[in-house]
Image: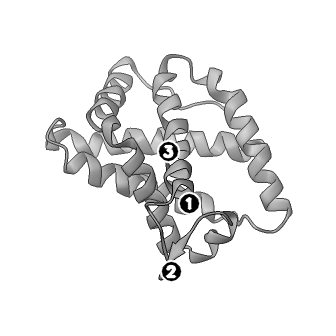
Amino acid sequence: MDWYPFTAEEKAQLVRSWKAIESQKQAIGCDIYEMIFNQCPEARKLFPKMKFVNSKPDKKSCEFAFQGLRFVQVIEGAVMSLDNLPALDPILDNLGRRHGKLEVNGKFRTYYWSTFLECSICIFRKTLSSCRKFPDKEIDRTIILWRYLLRDVMKKIKVAL
C-alpha cells in the first residue's frame, strides 16, 4: 500500500497546522480517546488499566494521559516524516502486530478503525478552529489533508494485522 502523494505545498500546510496545535498534543490525545469511548463504550475493554469515573475516562489518570499522548506521538511522527513516509512503516507495522493480537483475542473490532479516524478528524478540526495561530479559511482544506494522512497511517497499521 502506497502513501498518499502529498505535494510540497500540502506537506507545508500539514506542518503549519501541526505547529499551530502541537503544544496541545496531550489534550488532543485525551480528547480523541474520550470521544472514542463515548462513541464505542465497548472499546474500554482494550484498556484494562485505564480508570473510569461515572463511566467517563478519568483524564487525570496517568494511564489515560499516557495513552492519549502515545497516539498523538504516532501522528506527530507521520508529520515529521512527510518527506519520507515509508520510513514510518516499521513503527506502524509493529503497532499493527500488537493490535493484531487484540483482534485475535476478540477484543479489537474492525469498526474501531473508522471510529479512531472520525474522532481524530473531529478533534483536529475543533482544535484548529479554536486556535488563533491558524487561519479559518485554511481549515477545511487542511482537514482533508489530515484525513489522507491519518487514513494512510491506519491502513498501514491494519496491513500488519
Q: Which mark is residue 52?
A: none
- In this view, which residue lies farthest toward the bottom? 54
- Where, by quadrant of the figure, is residue 90 drawn? top right
| 31 w.r.t. 1: above or below | below
Residues marked 2 and 1 touching at CB (< 8 Å): no
Of residues 72 and 8, the one nearer the viewer is 72
| 25 w.r.t. 102: above or below | above
Gap between marks 2 and 1 measured at Cα: 22 Å
The mark nearer the N terminus, 1 or 3, is: 3
Residue 136, position in %: x, y?
Answer: 15, 44
What residue would you read off at disc 3? 69
Q: Which mark is residue 114?
A: 1
In this rendering, the label closer to the viewer, 2 or 1: 2
- Tell me which residue sits at (19%, 37%) in the image: 134
Residue 56, position in %: x, y?
Answer: 47, 75
Amino acid at pointer 1: Ser
What residue would you read off at disc 2? 55
The mark nearer the N terminus, 2 or 1, is: 2
In the rendered structure, the answer to whether residue 116 lies left or right of residue 122 reads right
| Element marked by disc 3 | helix
| Element marked by disc 1 | helix
Residues marked 3 and 2 touching at CB (< 8 Å): no
The mark nearer the N terminus, 3 or 2, is: 2
